[in-house]
């Protein structure tokens, strides 16, 4: 095959992805091999690829491709989440744009629209992942609303209910008035906002006296059912047993006493609104107060709001404040900073609301999840600092509100047979529910027509917490071959923002249903931010389109660019230049491959000693790097692993090894060296493949004609072998010698084509193993060791060894002496300033040891340089 001059990423990406799919390399079935399993964090079915997905899925693909090369039966299960709140909101908005109100539809009619939406947009993000090179087992693609997945969720609910862990309760919940559903505590984001504190006057019944009460929410006065004071507050003793009148609505409410009220805080009086504040509800229950709910489900005021009925709460806030001021009931207002709860999904301000909801008891369920991560280390978080976050959440866990007032999702399998709150049964289907209802009521005449299913849906997370089990059928059939083979999974790659929402809950579910952990390692990625450290988002307009980046830099370039700076748990300051760097690396490798394949190969010429040495050194260097890579992967330092490979390929292979073995101009290379160069290139490709799958497969297939079984994607990871570490250490000195020669050539304008002599005093008794390399890369005509300094020569020093290059007639000796004298004067001045610092007792006593060591090293380097310059001058005079 002819090798194209340029690496055409787009053509090659399509070619090899199609080839991999055609040969079914991504698919896994249970067999004799050890499984390596990853389940994808299912993106929202409504989503499109963003930079966070790019990072997360690139890391997963690196892990799965490496596992495949290491001989594991690699299985990466993809899928999407139905995302009940987000998806329902999109469908409602679409219907609204078509003039359709959700409330005018039956549940079945609405769900048809939701499924149409899902069918149209649901696969977009998975198709986009293919552009990235994601080697998912697409045959195993799952959706959390698939029939078998929904059946798993329903079975789980029934099981937990029968165990007494799920209960129905009338509780104060977080209400999202935009999505019109309850949220769990973890779905509420608290943000500091500047608002107002309103001081309101409540008149005491039968007198002209007032009580002043401070509130941030004057619109809630319509729900006030008491005023509370501290019984120990002498200011209000005379009001015991009296009533107050709520401004505007004129409701007469009791003045109650409770030590809950802080005498020192505010005015010492508290308005009690049991329907709209968690603490007020507790006071209301304690003092048997009336509960007045003033809001509709969209946070407009209901009939209790009188002439404000139908208006939004925030509109009413301003209008009520104005009316209070007009009637003399507003004493004053102050600017006030307080924390406001907002919905993670819709950004709407949360409204506390009393409601019948379903809850899951967490106190006992959470114990194995705490033990596995924080005590016995069965599950490891990377980086480990997230253990503290995990501990805080799980040690302070509250019962989980698992019901949502939505239609899109798994409908709660509770069936009501009467009007009472307890007149229900829980079952997997209506037929089973009827059997249980007949037993519970002793009414054999009941029919399914007498049962009505709870209209609410389950929290999306109640579906996805089963993900590692349900994707393998483990809830419905725990004895299935797939589940027993692939579960527990190995690694989970996700963001720290869902450490509690998803990760912790999967661990809880795993132990509850299998007694086993769902995975062993959790790699927590950082957020992708822009250069100004802002989180990337569509609203800020600072997030590039990942597909545009792939188009511009190639998938391999983008993958490398992202991962070079993506250490676990640390945020990435993304810059397109990173992708450009990745593209540059792609071109470097391509050009190195073209260089090798462009050499003429001779089977008759012997292998030069320099090439033999080069091969032995690079083999050692590759083995050393391989050990470092394995260590980094073990510690989930994916970025460091890539950087190690990057340096090996760019510096050691391209910059040194190929130079060492490169044949002279228009001369052939010997077959032994060429074959070794190809072998080393192939090993490099194996190490690079998880990071740069398209480029590496393209070069691999160009090197030789390969069968489908010989493709790089199913090749074998390089084997760790013993190596000579001293070769690597000795070569570091050799690099310095070659650099010294090149510096003199550059400074003295000696062309590389002109051979020069080199003489050396081997004071360090270093190995002469690399002398042939020095000779070749320095274009040395004669390299010999001498006992004494060489007169009339330019010199340089590497450690204690001295190297001399005899001067040719083309060098201007006088100019060289002048130059060396100037350099000597400068270095002597520098040395004097350093020594003056070190002679200063105050500096030495106060400086950190690291600073002192640095200054002493400067002194040592300056002394060595002066000695070398003086030797060079002596040789020239």
Image (cartoon, helix red, strand yellow):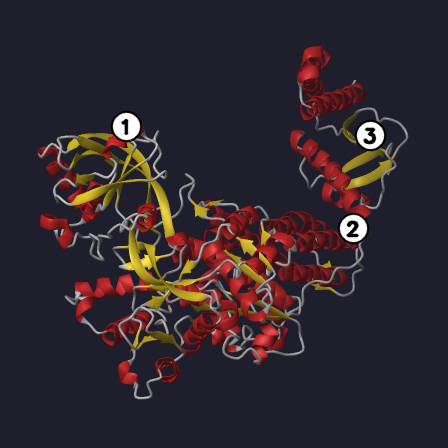
The x, y position of residue 751, in whole percent, is 67, 37
Residue at x 16% of width, y 41% of height: 246
The x, y position of residue 276, in whole percent, is 27, 49
Q: Give yes or no for contact between labels 3 and 1 (Cβ–Cβ under 8 Å).
A: no
- Could you tell whether 286 is left or right of 96 in the image? right
Disc sitting over residue 235 in the figure: 1
Disc sitting over residue 643 in the figure: none
Q: How far apart are labels 2 and 1 at the CA level?
A: 98 Å
Q: How far apart are labels 3 and 1 at the CA level?
A: 90 Å
Residue at x 80% of width, y 45% of height: 770
Choose mark 3 or mark 2, whichever is in front: 3
The x, y position of residue 409, in whole percent, is 35, 69
Instruction: Check the image and report above or below for 258 versus 566.
Output: above
Query: What residue is disc 2 on?
Result: 610
Q: Give yes or no for contact between labels 2 and 1 (Cβ–Cβ under 8 Å).
A: no
Tell me the element at label 1.
Answer: helix
Choose mark 2 or mark 1, whichever is in front: 1
| Image quadrant occupied by the C terminus | top right
Question: Crowdedness of circle 2 by 10 Å Cα count: few (<14), some, many (20+)?
Answer: some
Residue at x 28% of width, y 28% of height: 235
| One can see residue 600 in this view | no
Closer to the chain start, of discs 3 and 2, is 2
Q: Nearer the viewer, residue 666 or 843?
A: 843
Query: What residue is disc 3 on?
Result: 800
Q: Give yes or no for contact between labels 3 and 2 (Cβ–Cβ under 8 Å).
A: no
| Image quadrant occupied by the N terminus | bottom right
Residue 737 location, quadrant:
top right
């Amino acid at each position: 095959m002819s090798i194209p001059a340029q690496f055409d990423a787009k053509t090659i990406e399509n070619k090899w992805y199609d080839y991999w799919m055609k040969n079914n390399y991504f698919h896994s079935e249970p067999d004799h091999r050890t499984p390596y399993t990853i389940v994808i964090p299912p993106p929202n079915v409504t989503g499109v690829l963003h930079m966070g997905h790019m990072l997360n899925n690139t890391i997963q693909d690196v892990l799965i491709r490496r596992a495949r090369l290491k001989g594991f039966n690699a299985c990466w299960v993809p899928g999407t989440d139905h995302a009940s709140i987000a998806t329902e909101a999109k469908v409602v908005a679409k219907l609204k744009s078509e003039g359709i109100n959700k409330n005018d539809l039956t549940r079945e009619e609405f769900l048809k629209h939701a499924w149409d939406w899902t069918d149209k947009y649901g696969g977009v993000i998975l198709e986009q992942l293919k552009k990235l090179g994601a080697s998912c087992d697409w045959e195993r693609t799952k959706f959390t609303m698939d029939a078998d997945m929904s059946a798993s969720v329903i079975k789980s609910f029934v099981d937990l209910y029968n165990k007494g862990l799920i209960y129905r309760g009338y509780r104060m919940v977080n209400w999202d008035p935009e999505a019109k559903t309850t949220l769990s505590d973890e779905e509420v984001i608290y943000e500091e906002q500047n608002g107002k504190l309103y001081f309101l006057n409540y008149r005491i019944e039968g007198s002209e006296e007032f009580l002043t009460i401070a509130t941030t929410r004057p619109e809630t006065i319509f729900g006030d059912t008491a005023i509370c004071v501290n019984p120990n507050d002498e200011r209000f003793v005379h009001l015991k047993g009296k009533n107050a009148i709520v401004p505007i609505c004129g409701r007469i409410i009791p003045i109650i006493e409770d030590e809950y009220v802080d005498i020192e805080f505010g005015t010492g009086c508290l308005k009690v609104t049991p329907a709209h504040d968690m603490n007020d509800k507790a006071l209301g229950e304690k003092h048997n107060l009336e509960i007045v709910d003033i809001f509709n489900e969209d946070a407009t005021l209901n009939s209790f709001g009188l002439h404000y009925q139908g208006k939004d709460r925030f509109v009413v806030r301003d209008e009520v404040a104005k009316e209070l001021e007009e009637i003399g009931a507003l004493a004053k207002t102050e600017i006030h900073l307080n924390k406001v709860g907002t919905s993670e999904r819709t950004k709407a301000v949360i409204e506390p609301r009393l409601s019948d909801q379903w809850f899951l008891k967490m106190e006992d369920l959470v114990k194995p999840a705490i033990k596995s991560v924080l005590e016995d280390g069965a599950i490891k978080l990377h980086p480990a600092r997230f253990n503290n976050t995990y501990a805080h959440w799980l040690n302070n866990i509250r019962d989980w509100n698992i019901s949502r007032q939505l239609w899109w999702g798994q409908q709660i399998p509770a069936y009501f047979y009467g009007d009472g709150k307890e007149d229900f049964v829980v079952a997997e289907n209506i037929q089973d529910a009827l059997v249980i209802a007949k037993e519970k009521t002793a009414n054999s005449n009941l029919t399914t027509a007498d049962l009505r299913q709870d209209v609410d849906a389950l929290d999306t997370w109640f579906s996805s917490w089963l993900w590692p089990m349900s994707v393998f059928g483990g809830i419905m059939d725990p004895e299935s071959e797939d589940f027993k083979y692939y579960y527990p999974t190995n690694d989970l790659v996700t963001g720290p923002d869902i450490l509690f929402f998803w990760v912790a809950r999967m661990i809880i579910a795993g132990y509850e249903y299998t007694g086993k952990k769902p995975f062993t390692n959790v790699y927590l990625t950082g957020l992708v931010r822009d250069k100004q450290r802002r989180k990337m988002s569509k609203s800020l307009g600072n997030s590039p389109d990942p597909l545009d980046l792939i188009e511009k830099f190639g998938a391999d370039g983008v993958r490398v660019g992202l991962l070079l700076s993506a250490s676990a748990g640390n945020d990435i300051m993304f810059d397109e230049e990173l992708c450009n760097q990745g593209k540059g690396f792609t071109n470097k490798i391509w050009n190195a491959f073209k260089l090798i394949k462009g050499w003429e190969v001779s089977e008759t010429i012997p292998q030069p000693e320099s090439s033999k040495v080069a091969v032995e050194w690079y083999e050692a260097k590759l083995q050393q790097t391989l050990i470092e890579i394995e260590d980094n992967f073990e510690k989930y330092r994916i970025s460091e692993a890539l950087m190690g490979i990057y340096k090996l390929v760019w510096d050691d292979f391209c910059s040194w090894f190929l130079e060492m073995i490169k044949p002279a101009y228009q001369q052939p290379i010997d077959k032994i060296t060429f074959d070794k160069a190809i072998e080393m290139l192939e090993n490099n490709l194996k190490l690079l493949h998880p990071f740069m799958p398209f480029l590496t497969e393209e070069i691999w297939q160009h090197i030789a004609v390969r069968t489908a079984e010989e493709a790089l994607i199913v090749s074998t990871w390089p084997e760790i072998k013993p190596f000579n570490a001293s070769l690597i250490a000795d070569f570091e000195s050799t690099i310095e010698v070659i650099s010294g020669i090149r510096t003199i050539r550059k400074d003295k304008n000696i062309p590389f084509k002109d051979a020069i002599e080199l003489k050396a005093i081997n004071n360090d008794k270093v190995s002469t193993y690399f002398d042939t390399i020095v000779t070749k890369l320095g274009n040395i005509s004669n390299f010999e060791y001498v006992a004494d300094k060489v007169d009339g020569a330019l010199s340089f020093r590497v450690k204690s060894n001295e190297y001399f290059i005899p001067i040719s007639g083309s060098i201007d000796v006088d100019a060289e002496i002048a130059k060396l004298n100037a350099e000597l004067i400068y270095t002597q001045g520098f040395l004097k300033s350093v020594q003056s610092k070190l002679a200063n007792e105050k500096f030495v006593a106060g400086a950190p040891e690291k600073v002192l060591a640095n200054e002493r090293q400067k002194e040592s380097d300056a002394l060595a340089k002066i000695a070398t310059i003086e030797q060079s001058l002596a040789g020239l005079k």
